[in-house]
Amino acid sequence: MKYSDIDPRKKAFVFELDNVIYPEKDYLFQVYYLFAGLIEYTELSDAKTITDLMVATYTAEGRDVVFDRVKEELGIDEKYRISFQHLLLTAKLPLKLLVYQAVLDLMQEVVIDRKKLYLVTNGNPAQQLNKIKQTEWHGLEPYLTCYFAEETLPKPEPDVLHLLMKEQGLTRKDILMIGNSADDVLCAEATGVDYINVKEFL
């Protein structure tokens, strides 16, 4: 799917952040690398072993158990959980986060066509803002307006989209929502806005 395939009456395009704008693992794996470096420095453990285990755990079991597996299998002290959680929120990444090329092309066409771009993202607002600041937007920053769903109610609750429509003077028919999760689908349905999975563009 391309921008030209979308209903030209749409005025506003609403994107989730993780796994829609960029692959979430691109952020997390850099955090794992930084955390492993911290542990190597303080505990003289091997950073590569730690990083490899963290990446493997994320791939096999998901992000929520990564620290637990490192603690269990490598004997990392529980006191480092706070450091890990802090890094997840505030890490200064070695490399910028890169927008999927097809999504970047889409967003650039939206701006050229004088339509509106919105990021509406679940997750901790501090962490999501940290990701946004470290994304390579190729000059799109002035055209982005961000809403953090946690500040109202997380998706799939529709509150954040209702707020966006009220503040931006939009109706549900004006909006196309682009996401990659059941929460996004349900939020779009509850609000009555059209929805496309980002995979249609990738």
Image (cartoon, rainbow, N blue to C red):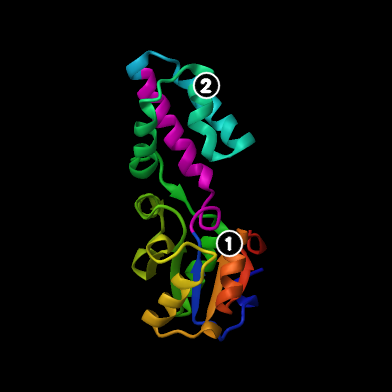
* Circle 2 crowding by C-alpha within 10 Å: few under 14, some 14–19, many from 20: few
Question: Hey, what amino acid is under mark 2?
Answer: Glu
Q: CA distance from mark 2 to mark 1?
A: 32 Å
Pinpoint residue 79: horizontal percent, then vertical percent.
35, 25
Pinpoint residue 157: horizontal percent, then vertical percent.
51, 67
Magenta segment boundaries in residue numbering:
17-40
State left or right for residue 63 relative to residue 170.
Answer: right
Query: Please, which residue is most extreme toward the top here?
Result: 44
Judging by the rendered image, the residue that carries numbered circle 1 is: 183
User: In percent of the image, x 65 and y 76: which residue is there?
Assistant: 5
State left or right for residue 159 relative to residue 126.
Answer: right
Q: Nearer the viewer, residue 69 or 38?
A: 69
Q: Main secondary structure of the magenta part?
A: helix
On the image, which quarter does residue 193 sit in? bottom right
What numbered label is drawn on residue 72?
2
Q: Nearer the viewer, residue 193 or 156?
A: 156
Q: Are marks 2 and 1 in contact (CB under 8 Å)?
A: no
